[in-house]
Image (cartoon, helix red, strand yellow):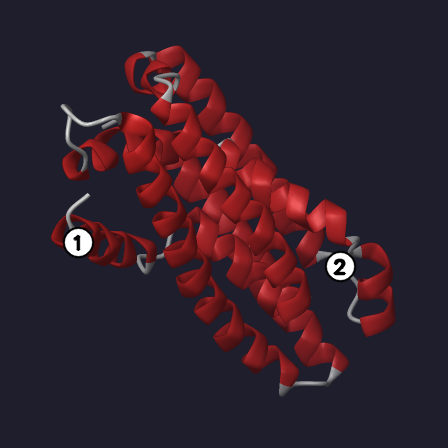
């Protein structure tokens, strides 16, 4: 793959990733509600979900979502409902740091990030439309994906980590229980908002 093509892909990925969407709202919601550690663990699951989505598109299964209104709608509503449920849980979460630590198992947070990404039909449709613009049809597909997929995941990690650090910094400076409770509710509102955004999505 020419370096110029890779650079254009990296730049386009960065622009797309800094636009707030369900994933950004998910990690920011957890950074505000539970702190940086919970959000970074969630981000690990998100990145695995992105890698799976790219792989699924590579074998052509993602085209099913782009072509079938029924499948797209099922994925959309399941994903939206899951985000809203997570938002309600965070809205009602305890503000005691020890209680938060006890209830926020690392494996569960990573799985939540993975599920939210995997149930995002717009993400699969996006990869179906986005990746071919930077690939050569005559060249083998797998070597190109071996470059593009890690690049996108790395860019996603960098941009989302920046959002997490900023949001977590806000929470770290505030210790009052009433303020932390309000931050939890802001974070929960972000997740509920992400669910509403997902529910409002339409096929391209």
Q: Is residue 120 visible?
A: no
Q: Quadrant of residue 10?
A: bottom left
Name the residue that disc number 1 marks.
3
Q: Is residue 66 above or below residue 21?
A: above
> As rendered, which of 96 and 153 lies closer to the eye?
153
Q: Residue at x 44, y 47 (%)?
A: 22
Q: Residue at x 52, y 74 (%)?
A: 165
> As rendered, which of 91 and 61 lies closer to the eye?
61
Q: How many marks?
A: 2
Left of 143 or right of it: where is 120?
A: right
In the picture, the quarter occupied by the C terminus is: top left
Nearer-N-terminus badge (1/2)? 1
Can you give x and y, in whole percent of width and height, for residue 32 in the image? 59, 69
CA gap between label 1 and label 2 equals: 47 Å
Q: Residue at x 62, y 88 (%)?
A: 173
Mark 2 neighbour class, 10 Å CA radius: few under 14, some 14 to 19, many 20 or more: some
Q: Residue at x 86, y 65 (%)?
A: 99
Left of 87 or right of it: where is 96?
A: right
Q: Is residue 67 visible?
A: yes
SS at badge 1: helix
On residue 74, the disc is none
SS at badge 2: loop
Can you give x and y, in whole percent of width and height, for residue 27 in the image? 54, 58
Q: Is residue 165 above or below residue 104?
A: below
Can you give x and y, in whole percent of width and height, for residue 97 in the image? 81, 73
Between label 1 and label 2, give the one nearer the viewer: 1
Name the residue that disc number 2 marks.
93
Q: Quadrant of residue 95?
A: bottom right
Q: CB under 8 Å between callouts 1 and 2?
A: no
In the picture, the quarter occupied by the N terminus is: top left
Can you give x and y, in whole percent of width and height, for residue 191 in the image? 54, 51
> As rendered, which of 109 and 69 lies closer to the eye?
109
């Amino acid at each position: 793959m020419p370096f110029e093509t890779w650079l254009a892909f990296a730049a386009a990925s960065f622009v797309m990733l800094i636009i707030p969407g369900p994933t950004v709202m998910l990690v920011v919601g957890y950074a505000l509600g539970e702190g940086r550690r919970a959000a970074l663990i969630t981000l690990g699951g998100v990145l695995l979900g992105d890698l799976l989505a790219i792989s699924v598109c590579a074998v052509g299964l993602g085209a099913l979502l782009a072509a079938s209104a029924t499948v797209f709608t099922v994925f959309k509503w399941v994903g939206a409902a899951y985000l809203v449920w997570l938002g309600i849980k965070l809205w009602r979460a305890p503000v005691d740091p020890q209680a938060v630590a006890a209830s926020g198992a690392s494996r569960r947070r990573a799985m939540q990030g993975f599920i939210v990404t995997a149930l995002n039909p717009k993400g699969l449709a996006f990869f179906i439309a986005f990746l071919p613009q930077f690939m050569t049809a005559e060249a083998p597909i797998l070597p190109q994906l071996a470059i593009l997929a890690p690049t996108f995941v790395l860019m996603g990690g960098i941009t989302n980590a920046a959002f997490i650090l900023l949001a977590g910094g806000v929470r770290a400076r505030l210790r009052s229980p009433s303020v932390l409770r309000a931050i939890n509710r802001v974070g929960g509102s972000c997740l509920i908002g992400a669910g509403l955004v997902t529910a409002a999505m339409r096929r391209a």
